[in-house]
Amino acid sequence: MNFTIEIEQEEDGRFLAEVIDFPGVLAYGQTKEEAVARVQALALRVLADKLEYEEVTHSS
């Protein structure tokens, strides 16, 4: 699965990465790479939760 990630640098120098496909999934990092790694990990956790929830609701 591919995620669309937008990255921007804040005024304080930190980087903010956001996964466009999942509203509210964003993470900060001191570098672009750190922000991307954090937001990718968060997106995967959100996706795993979503898949688990769908599995539970469809098996009931």
Image: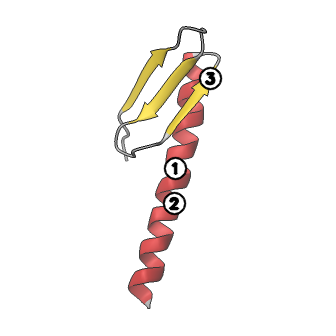
Query: Which quadrant, please, contains the C terminus?
Result: bottom left
As drawn, the label of residue 33 is none
Measured in 3D between alpha carbons, the distance from the residue under mark 1 to the one under mark 2, in whole angstroms, is 6 Å
Please, is residue 47 above or below residue 33 in the view? below
**Quick one: SS at disc 2?**
helix
Can you tell which of label 2 and label 3 is closer to the viewer?
3
Location of mark 1 (residue): 44
Question: x, y percentage for residue 46?
Answer: 50, 54
Would residue 22 appear left or right of 43 to someone viewing this image?
A: left
Question: x, y percentage for residue 38?
Answer: 60, 34
Please, is residue 42 above or below residue 8 in the view? below
Measured in 3D between alpha carbons, the distance from the residue under mark 3 to the one under mark 1, in whole angstroms, is 17 Å
Figure label count: 3
**Quick one: SS at disc 3?**
strand
Q: Amino acid at mark 1?
A: Leu
As drawn, the label of residue 29 is 3
Can you tell which of label 3 and label 1 is closer to the viewer?
3
Q: Are marks 1 and 2 in contact (CB under 8 Å)?
A: yes
Q: Which corner quadrant of the image does residue 55 belong to?
A: bottom left
Q: Which corner quadrant of the image does residue 19 belong to?
A: top left
Earlier sequence position, callout 3 versus callout 1: 3
Location of mark 2 (residue): 48
**The residue positioned farthest toward the bottom in the image shown:** 60
Earlier sequence position, callout 2 versus callout 3: 3
Q: Amino acid at mark 2?
A: Ala
**Quick one: SS at disc 1?**
helix
Please, is residue 42 above or below residue 45 in the view? above
